[in-house]
Image (spheres, rainbow, N blue to C red):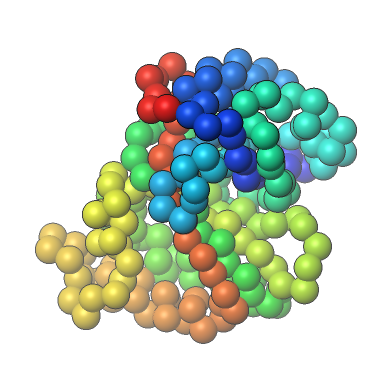
Amino acid sequence: MNDVYEYRSVRIRRGAWRELAMATAALADPPAYALFAGMIGFASDEGILMRVWPDSESLVERATRALPAHIIESRVDRLTATVRPIDQTPPRVDGVYAHRWFWLQPQDWPEFQNLSEEGIWPYFESDGCAIIGLWRSSEPGPLAAALLITRHPSVAHWERTRLQSTEPPPGADERLYRQAQTAGRRRAEITERSIVRLTRLIVPGQSQRS
């Protein structure tokens, strides 16, 4: 599969989220995969637009021609899906979506992916999270870059799953929590840098805040 995910960081006209949501819902070639408005780590006029293209050439040739006029500035990262998502079904459940970028040495990628999928995600998903996807960047650079998007019911829930506490949160599966802590420590060891920012999903057809 050669599908390329367009991860476009956008800045929009002031107060234009409602208009951008309507314009994004009308995109058809290709349709929008997801539109996220920034919450924590973004300015009030910043967010993320994601679309899926059949290949990089199509993205380069056609992406900017189809951009809604409400976007006044943008930058693109080209991504390839790994173990998630398994298809192109877009996320449609309200909640807080954490976008976490990791940078690591390319030779550490197989271990990084396994630690995430087998070590950490089982606890997250048992505690109410949804792993939307783990993508690897196709952009050139000395380090491998990966993007993990995880849905949480709330900001408080995101805080709950950060694996910082010695004891698991109330009601959590202790075995999976300990497993995730061990895997998380190892993943941190092979990660050279990372950043996480929080967004809210703008679902087509729903009313939006300006």
Percent coordinates x, y for residue 127 in the rendering: 26, 55
Quadrant of the snapshot with the N terminus: top right
Q: Quadrant of residue 185?
A: bottom left
Percent coordinates x, y for residue 75 in the rendering: 71, 46
Closer to us: 9 or 25: 9
Percent coordinates x, y for residue 119 in the rendering: 42, 69
Q: Quadrant of residue 202?
A: top left
Q: Is residue 160 above or below residue 93?
A: below
Residue at (82%, 29%) from the top-left corner?
Answer: 62
- Tell me if 22 is positioned left or right of 95 in this view: right
On the question of residue 46 being in view, the answer is yes
Closer to us: 66 or 33: 66
Quadrant of the snapshot with the C terminus: top left
Q: How many marks?
A: 0
Residue at (17%, 66%) from the top-left corner?
Answer: 169
- Tell me if 27 is positioned left or right of 89 in this view: right
- Tell me if 39 is positioned left or right of 191 in this view: left
Percent coordinates x, y for residue 156 in the rendering: 24, 54
Q: Quadrant of residue 167?
A: bottom left
Q: Is residue 119 above or below residue 47?
A: below
On the question of residue 21 being in view, the answer is no
User: For the view shown, which residue lies furthest in the left direction?
Assistant: 170
Residue at (61%, 53%) from the top-left corner?
Answer: 135
Q: Is residue 19 above or below residue 52?
A: above
